[in-house]
Image (tube, rainbow, N blue to C red):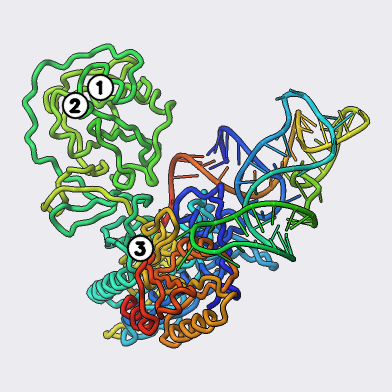
Amino acid sequence: MRTSQFPLNTVKEIPADAEIASHQLMIRAGLIRKLAAGIYTWLPLGLRVLRKVENIVREEMDKAGGLEVLMPALQPAELWQETGRWEKYGPELARMKDRHDRDFCLGPTHEEIITDLARNELKSYKQLPVCYYQIQTKFRDEIRPRFGIMRSREFLMKDAYSFHLDQASLNATYQVMYQAYSHIFNRFGLKFRAVIADSGSIGGAVSHEFHVLADSGEDAIAFSTESEYAANVEKAEALMPSVERAAAGAAMQCVETPNQHSIEEVSQFLSVPPQQCLKTLIVRGEDETLVALLLRGDHELNPIKAEKIEGVKSPLQFASDIEIQAACACKPGSIGPVNLSMKVVADRSVVAMADFVCGANQDGKHFQHVNWERDLALPELADLRMVVEGDPSPDGRGTITIARGIEVGHIFQLGTKYSEAMNAAIINEAGKNQIMIMGCYGIGISRVVAAAIEQSHDDRGIIWPKDLAPFQVAICPMNMHKSDRLQETVEKIYQDLSKAGIEVLLDDRKVRAGFMFSDMELIGIPHRIVIGDRGLDSGTVEYQGRQDQASQELAMQDIVSFIQAKLA
RNA sequence: CGGAGCGUAGCGCAGCUUGGUAGCGCACUUGUCUGGGGGACAAGGGGUCGCAGGUUCAAAUCCUGUCGUUCCGACCA
C-alpha cells in the first residue's frame, strides 16, 4: 500500500474528550472517528487492525471446533420475553418498535437467539456437543460510554455458545475454549492473565475472565505470589483469619465522639488504629427488612459477595439515612452491632478483632473495648470484603498482590439457565427429551484493539505487536521525487517485500523526513526502512525497529530476508 | 437518572464579564524557497457562533427553553 492511495488521517492535536492513551492514540493515528457518544467509525487503517484481531480469533475458534454462524443484530422481543430478560435487562437494552408496532431490540448478546436456533436445529444427542460462534456487532446502551472504543455502545464481539448432553461434556469444551483463548491472546502478543471471575448477570457457575494487563485497566486482579491463582478481586476469596483472637481487656465503655462519623475520623479521635474499629453498614434486605454488615475498619465491602448473602437484596442497595434513623435511632456514622435489632452478618476477619471500637447507636457516641462473646454474641460470619495486598492466597500458597487489567474475554459455564427457560431439549440415548447444558464464550474484538494500545505505546505513539500491526514495514524514501534512480530502487524494494507476502506501507507523499517518521511512529509500524540517495551508492538502507534506539545499516539485497527473520 | 462543565471553520481554542466589522494556532489550496525528525515566506478557501424563542436600534455576547456532548457516582466484552 502507498500513502498516496491510503490516506493516514493522522492528527497532531490531542482530542479534548479523550482521556486515556488508547483513546487519544486511536483518534490521533486515524484508526477511528466518533460519530456519536460511544459510536465510532473505523477508518481504513483501524479496520486493518480490527480484521487482524478478528482473523486470529476466527482461526483459533475454527481450530477448536467452533462452527461459525451469523445471527441478526436486530432481535424480536418474544425470545427475550421467554427468558424473562426483556423485563430484567434495564435501559441498557436498546428497544424499538418496527412499523407494525412489534417490539424488537438491538442485541447486546445472543443467548436467546442461539438457544432458539439450537432447539430448532438440534434433535438428537448424536449431534452433541456442538459449539457455534459468530463475530457480530453488539449494542449496549451504556449509561456512560467512555474511553473511546474501550467502553463504547456499539462494539464488535466474538461470542460462542456450546451445547451439551452432560456436565462432563461441558467441562471438556470449557477446557478446549480455555486453551483456545490462551492461544488467541498469545498470538495477539499481549501480556494477559486468565482469572477466576464472577459470572455476573449472564448467570452460571464456573467462569473465567481473560484480562490484558495494563495499569489503566478498569478491573483489579488478585494474584498469588507463589501459585497460579488469579482472580478478579470481585471474586477473590478472603479466608478466615488464622490468628487467634486476643483476650478481652478493659470493660466495654461508651465514649463521646461528637461529629466523628467515618472510621478515619473516629480512629483519629480516639487514637485507635482503623483495624481496631468495626465498620457497620446497613443494606436493604428482602421483604422490607434491613441487614447490618460488619467489616474491619480498614477493609472495604465487596458488593458482589454481599448481595449473595441470604436475606440481602440483590442488587445491593444501601439503606437511606431515614431508614437507618428509624431502625437504629441514630445517623449512619454511629451505628454498631451492640443491641442492634436486625439481621447481622460479619466479615470473617471480624472474628479476630478484640477490644474494638464500634458505634453505640446514639449520635455522637461510640463503644470502646468491645469484645465478642463477652459484650455481644458473635454474629453469622461470611466472606464480605475486598481482598487486599498481603492477604493469604485462597489456594493456600503465597500471598495476594493486586494488578490492573482490561477484561477482553470471558468464558462461562451457563448450565441450563437459558435452555430450560426456552425448552431447548434433544432426544437422549434413552429416547427421552433432555434439556441441553450450555457454555458461552466471549471476546471483545474491538476492545482488544484498544487494550493492545493501552498496554503497548510510548510518547511517540502506538507500538503494535507484530501480528496486530496494520502494516509490518514502512518504507520512507528521502526526496524520492527528485531522483529517478531512487524511485526505481524504492519501487523494487516495495515489490520484493510485497511479493514475499509482507504488508508494506510505502510513504510516497512529498513530505519531509521528520513528517514521515513521526507519522509512522504514531501509527505504530513495527519496522521502518529509510532509503536515500546517499545509501544508493553504497547499496545500503537504514533499518530501525519501532522500539530500537538507533538505526542500523542494511545491504539492499538482504532486506527481504532480514525482515522475514524479524517477522518470524 | 442524579450532580458539574462545554457547544464559535475539519481539529484545538480565544472572544461573552462590560451587546456594535467573528478571531488565533493546526489542518487544507496555490506559488517560491527548503529538503534526514511534524520547515519558511507569500497569497487564498472555509463560520446561519448547536437549535428555537425572547429582550434590544443592534445578540456569539443578556434571558428562557431545547438538543447534543464531556466529566464525577450505579453496568460490562
- Amino acid, disc 1: Ser
Question: What is the CA distance from the residue labelled 3 to the residue labelled 2?
Answer: 57 Å
- Amino acid, disc 3: Ala
Q: Are marks 1 and 2 in contact (CB under 8 Å)?
A: yes
Q: Which residue is mark 3?
A: A550
User: Considering depth in this image, is B18 or A324 the residue closer to the camera?
Assistant: B18
Q: For residue A87, say whether it is visible.
A: no
Q: Earlier in the sequence, mark 3 or mark 2?
A: 2
The answer as to whether the residues below labels 3 and 1 share one chain is yes
The answer as to whether the residues below labels 3 and 2 share one chain is yes
User: Considering depth in this image, is A75 or B32 the residue closer to the camera?
Assistant: B32
User: Considering depth in this image, is B14 or B3 the residue closer to the camera?
Assistant: B14
Q: Is residue A551 above or below residue A59?
A: above
Q: Which residue is mark 1?
A: A267
Q: Residue at x 53, y 62 (%)?
A: A515
Q: Position of residue A59 (x, y in %)?
A: 37, 80
Asked if residue A418 lies left or right of residue A175, the reply is right
Q: Is label 3 in a helix, a strand or a loop? A: loop
> What chain does mark 3 sit on?
A
Question: What is the CA distance from the residue labelled 3 to the residue labelled 1?
Answer: 56 Å
Q: Which image quarter: residue A130?
A: bottom left
Disc nearest the viewer among 3 and 2:
3
- Amino acid, disc 2: Gln
Q: Is label 1 in a helix, a strand or a loop? A: helix
Marker count (numbered): 3
